Image (cartoon, grey):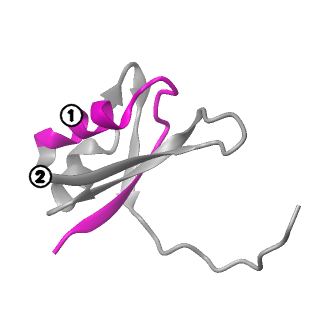
Amino acid sequence: MSQKLYVSNLPFQITEDDLKSHFLRYGEVISTVIVKDRDTGRSRGFGFVEMENGEKAIAEGNGSTLDGRTLTVSQAREREQRPRYSR
């Protein structure tokens, strides 16, 4: 069963492939997503990694460094339902 992990404090210049390469040391990576600002397209500094077994990635990846930044890795939570509004 796969697990979705929340990864924060990402360097703003990394790609999803860079993120995948970093997490491959902890096991099989199913997918990676870096969340981007919808107006500028720039990274917001966090993302998600889906892995087969995320426990090792949480234990060893939390506090690891990527391009000089210390990552925070935890189990992703379900997104809260918020009322929609129009701009």
Image quarter (top left, top right, bottom left or bottom right) of the N terminus: bottom left
Residue tagged by mark 2? 28
**Left or right, residue 29 beside residue 49:** left
Q: Secondary structure at mark 2?
A: loop
Q: Position of residue 18 (x, y in %)?
A: 30, 30
Residue drawn at (46%, 34%) of the image: 10
Residue drawn at (40%, 19%) of the image: 68
Q: Position of residue 20 (x, y in %)?
A: 25, 40
69 vs 47: above or below: above
Q: Position of residue 16 (x, y in %)?
A: 35, 38
Tell me the kind of residue under disc 1.
Answer: Ser
Q: In this orientation, does residue 64 appear?
A: no
Residue 2 in magenta stretch: yes
Question: Label 1 crowding class (10 Å Cα cut-off): few <14, some 14-19, many 20+?
Answer: few
The foreground one among 15 and 77 is: 15
Magenta extent: 1-25
Residue 57 in magenta stretch: no
Image quarter (top left, top right, bottom left or bottom right) of the C terminus: bottom right
Residue tagged by mark 1? 21
60 vs 51: above or below: above
Tell me the kind of residue under disc 2.
Answer: Glu
| Residue lying farthest to the right in this orientation | 87
The CA distance from mark 1 to mark 2 is: 10 Å
Disc 1 vs disc 2: Cβ atoms closer than 8 Å? no
